[in-house]
Image: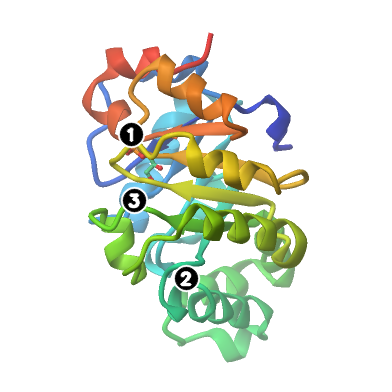
């Protein structure tokens, strides 16, 4: 499926470890769904979540956002339209370099060298479907330059984030994404807290070709508007989707 970011201003983050709202119809007006979480996520619950959403909305873009290779299986790769993989600027080395080199080492290796490694899922995929499947998978991967700005969040804990960036550093990370690393997405993550427009504005100054996602504490149309007006391309809404479907609907820009 072609992903047209110009059409996307509202993204829902569905956490596979949490129960989905009973009426998935509330997703009708969100533009895309990211499936991922930091705690209790497995390839199985991820697959269930992706499939449940696709059953209701076959044409809505659904991206898997795995934090660990254990969240990924041949089935999740096939079911999701993209794999969005965070590279956390203010995390530990494992979350900016280590994981990704491991992943692509496997993707680029020959099947017989992969089978039996600690990421058997990819080995199985390659053995079953050949190297074409590997290149199809590589095509599905998009990198997200990620800054996590809430030290209390599980995302910060699992990514080894111990310090917040200043507005200037957030802007620097945005500029590095656009001008140096070339990730298609820059994601400013306040997970569970509302960060306000200041560092959104600072980052937006430097983002032209890069899609700019903001996530954290969006629970009203006013906040959605404030973040979009500050220069983000889209808001990502997580907690509200699982906890308060009515409020969730109010976060969608009219
Ligand atoms: C979390 O950015 C998302 O990864 C959304 O944050 O849960 O605070 O809405 P909330």
Compared to residue 30, the image places residue 14 above or below, namely: below
Q: Is mark 1 within 8 Å of ligand 1?
A: yes
Q: Is mark 3 within 8 Å of ligand 1?
A: yes
Name the residue at 53% across, 72% down: 122
Label 3 to label 2, Cα distance in Å?
20 Å
Residue 81 appears anywhere in the view = no
Q: Nearer the viewer, residue 223 or 57?
A: 223
Give the crowd class for mark 1: few <14, some 14-19, many >=20 residues within 10 Å: many
Give the crowd class for mark 2: few <14, some 14-19, many >=20 residues within 10 Å: many
Q: Which residue is mark 2?
A: 121
Label 1 to label 3, Cα distance in Å?
15 Å
On the image, the x and y values in percent for residue 236 come to: 46, 35
Q: Is residue 84 left or right of residue 192?
A: right
Q: Earlier in the sequence, mark 1 or mark 3?
A: 3
Residue 184 appears anywhere in the view = yes
Q: Which residue is mark 3?
A: 37
Q: Would you say the residues marked 3 and 2 are in contact, meaning their CB atoms lie under 8 Å apart? A: no
Residue 120 numbered tag: none
Q: Is residue 222 left or right of residue 156?
A: right
């Amino acid at each position: 499926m072609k992903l047209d970011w110009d059409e996307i201003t509202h993204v829902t983050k569905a956490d596979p470890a949490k129960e989905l709202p009973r009426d998935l119809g509330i997703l009708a007006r969100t533009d895309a769904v990211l499936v991922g979480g930091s705690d209790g996520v497995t390839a199985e619950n991820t697959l269930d979540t992706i499939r449940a959403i696709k059953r209701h909305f076959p044409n809505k873009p659904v991206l898997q956002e795995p934090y660990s290779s254990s969240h990924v299986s041949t089935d999740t790769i096939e079911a999701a339209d993209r794999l969005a993989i965070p590279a956390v600027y203010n995390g530990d080395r494992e979350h900016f370099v280590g994981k990704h080199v491991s992943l692509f080492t496997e993707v680029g290796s020959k099947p017989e060298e992969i089978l039996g490694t600690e990421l058997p899922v990819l080995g199985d995929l390659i053995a079953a479907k050949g190297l074409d499947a590997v290149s199809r998978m590589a095509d599905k991967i998009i990198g997200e330059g990620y800054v996590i700005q809430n030290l209390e969040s599980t995302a910060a804990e699992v990514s080894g984030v111990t310090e917040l960036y200043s507005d200037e550093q957030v802007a620097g990370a945005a500029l590095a994404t656009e001008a140096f690393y070339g990730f298609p997405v820059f994601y400013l993550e306040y997970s569970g807290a509302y960060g306000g427009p200041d560092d959104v504005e600072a980052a937006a100054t430097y983002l032209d070709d890069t899609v700019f996602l903001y996530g954290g504490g969006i629970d009203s149309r006013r906040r959605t508007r404030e973040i979009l007006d500050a220069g983000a391309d889209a808001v990502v809404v997580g907690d509200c989707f699982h906890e308060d479907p009515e409020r969730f609907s109010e976060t969608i820009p009219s």
